[in-house]
Amino acid sequence: MSESKLAGQFFDAAIGLLQRVRDEESANVAAAGTAIADTVAAGGRLFAFGAGHSSLAAQDVVYRAGGFAVMNLLTVPGVVGVDVMPATLGSALERVDGLAGAVLDSSPARAGDLLVIISLSGRNALPVEMAMKARALGLTVIGVTSVAYATETTSRNLTGTYLKDHCDIVLDSKIAVGDAELTADGIEAPFAPASTVVTSALMQAMMAAAAGELVERGIEPPLLRSGNVDGGTEWNDRVMTEYGNRIFYRH
């Protein structure tokens, strides 16, 4: 099998998943957009969290051109990427009981805010506890996960539950258990994960829906512009000043 054929197969698989979530998750994406717009309109703050590679989709909506200035990354030391050494420590920390509560207690998140939690499997202690603790604190919780894991794997949380069980709104990425879209003769393991592509698309669709909701209410969405276009820096300075009390990645 040629390399180009495998590359084409991955594109086809990713496009198929994107079309599926577009069609099957449209109501949930709209609901998530409404929840975000409600929070922004009420003066609340927005946070996103993901562990390991799930953190890529969280970072994708924080401090970027075309994104909401008031979306903040909720960080847990050692789990927000693969830069921790050794990288396997990040996976281990996801399974530590009590860590999520400690993080939220020391974070600026409070009642009336909104937290998006991204976890492909939704089975580890960290995202499950994060959702439970956040809701107990009075936050709205949106979960982005693959619901299939809840029926095909066992929970690693003491409650035996999954992220999807503790969210106000769930966006299902439809990613198959194992997160690998391709197999081929001569390659012993399945390969070509698509979760980042699909999860990031869900996140951006949700934020686009929120922007539309705010405009319908007569509220200017707190969007950032690219600093690489004329006037972008001045625009961003204005937005960051106006919403400074809801932005936590500057100090």
Image (cartoon, rainbow, N blue to C red):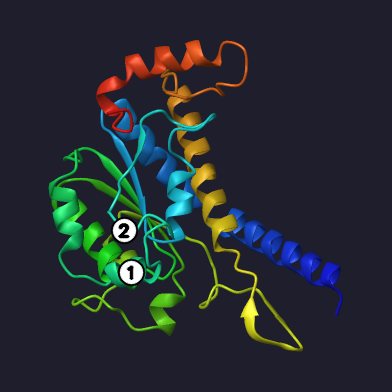
Q: Which of the 4 image quarters holds residue 46? A: top left
Q: Which of the 4 image quarters holds residue 246? A: top left
x and y percent of residue 91 in the render? 35, 70
What distance separates the C-alpha of mark 1 from that of mark 2? Answer: 7 Å
The foreground one among 139 and 103 is 103
Residue 222 visible at all:
yes
Q: Are marks 1 and 2 in contact (CB under 8 Å)?
A: yes
x and y percent of residue 152 in the render? 43, 84
Q: Residue at x 52, y 36 (%)?
A: 208
Q: Which of the 4 image quarters holds residue 43? A: top left
- Which element is circle 2 on? loop
Residue labelled with disc 1? 89
Tag 2: residue type? Gly
Question: Up-down: is 54 above or below 149?
Answer: above
Q: Residue at x 39, y 77 (%)?
A: 150
The foreground one among 31 and 191 is 191
Q: Is residue 101 left or right of residue 221?
A: left
Q: Residues within 10 Å of mark 1 (few under 14, many from 20)?
A: few
Tag 1: residue type? Leu
Residue 28 visible at all:
no
Q: Residue at x 20, y 41 (%)?
A: 109
x and y percent of residue 212 in the render? 50, 30
The dot on residue 78 is: 2
- Which element is circle 1 on? helix
Q: Is residue 189 left or right of residue 72?
A: right
Q: Where does the C terminus fall, quadrant-wise? A: top left
Question: Up-down: is 165 above or below 244?
Answer: below
